[in-house]
Image (spheres, rainbow, N blue to C red):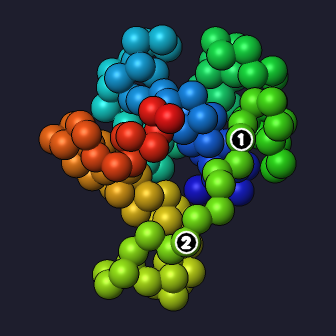
Amino acid sequence: MADEKLIRLANFRAFCKGRRLTPSRLAEDLGSRVSYWSDLLGGKKSFGEKIARRIEDHYQIGRGGLDEDKPREQTMKAAPKVDWPFDTYITPERWAALNPQQRAVVEWAAYEALQRVESAHPASPSRKRAAQ
């Protein structure tokens, strides 16, 4: 995946995270199947200019907003710094050894697992914190 596509993907993920946009919501807002959006966010689909401009137009990000190496503050928020969340299987060293596409796949898998856990246990601490 080219650098520009990785930048788009990272910016789009940050945009979706900041607005709590799920693949289901993206499908509702922009069309296409839920699996398409899941694959795009997971780095399994190519993130070309055509889809980037469609997203930017729909969400009024501004043309080229997803392509910026340092995204616009008002468009995408940086994730807060947190301690390393994993203890045993995903170490910082293993994470550092991954290339950006591999990191994207691991991150998306963790995100989907987190959603399943939160759905099964709606009163989890992370849900309570997010609601506050």
Query: x and y percent of residue 87 in the render?
Result: 36, 81
Q: Nearer the viewer, residue 57 or 48?
A: 57
The correct choice, above or below, for 100 with respect to 21 in the image is below
Quarter of the figure with residue 128: top left
The correct choice, above or below, for 132 with respect to 87 in the image is above
Q: Secondary structure at mark 2?
A: loop
Query: x and y percent of residue 69 in the render?
Result: 81, 49
* Among the two numbered marks 2 and 1 on one chain, the one whose residue lies closer to the N terminus: 1
Query: x and y percent of residue 31 in the render?
Result: 43, 12
**Dot 2 crowding, Cα within 10 Å, few <14, some 14–19, many 20+:** few
Q: Nearer the viewer, residue 18 or 24?
A: 18
The correct choice, above or below, for 44 with respect to 19 in the image is below
Q: Amino acid at mark 1?
A: Lys
Q: Amino acid at mark 2?
A: Asp
Is residue 2 visible from the viewing direction of this image?
no
At horizontal 37% and vertical 40% (from top left) the residue drawn is: 127
Q: Which mark is residue 32?
A: none
Query: x and y percent of residue 41 in the render?
Result: 47, 42
- The quarter of the picture where the N terminus appears is bottom right
**Label 2, label 1: how far apart the Cα atoms are:** 19 Å
At horizontal 22% and vertical 48% (from top left) the residue drawn is: 117
The correct choice, above or below, for 5 with respect to 63 in the image is below
Quarter of the figure with residue 3: bottom right
Query: In this figure, which residue is indicated by the disc labeled 1?
Result: 77
Which circle, 2 or 1, is nearer the viewer? Answer: 2
At horizontal 51% and vertical 82% (from top left) the residue drawn is: 92
Q: Nearer the viewer, residue 4 or 130?
A: 130
Q: Is residue 115 left or right of residue 81?
A: left
Query: In this figure, which residue is indicated by the disc labeled 2?
Result: 83
Q: Is residue 59 left or right of residue 130?
A: right
Q: Is residue 10 left or right of residue 17?
A: right
How many numbered dots are placed on residues in this image? 2
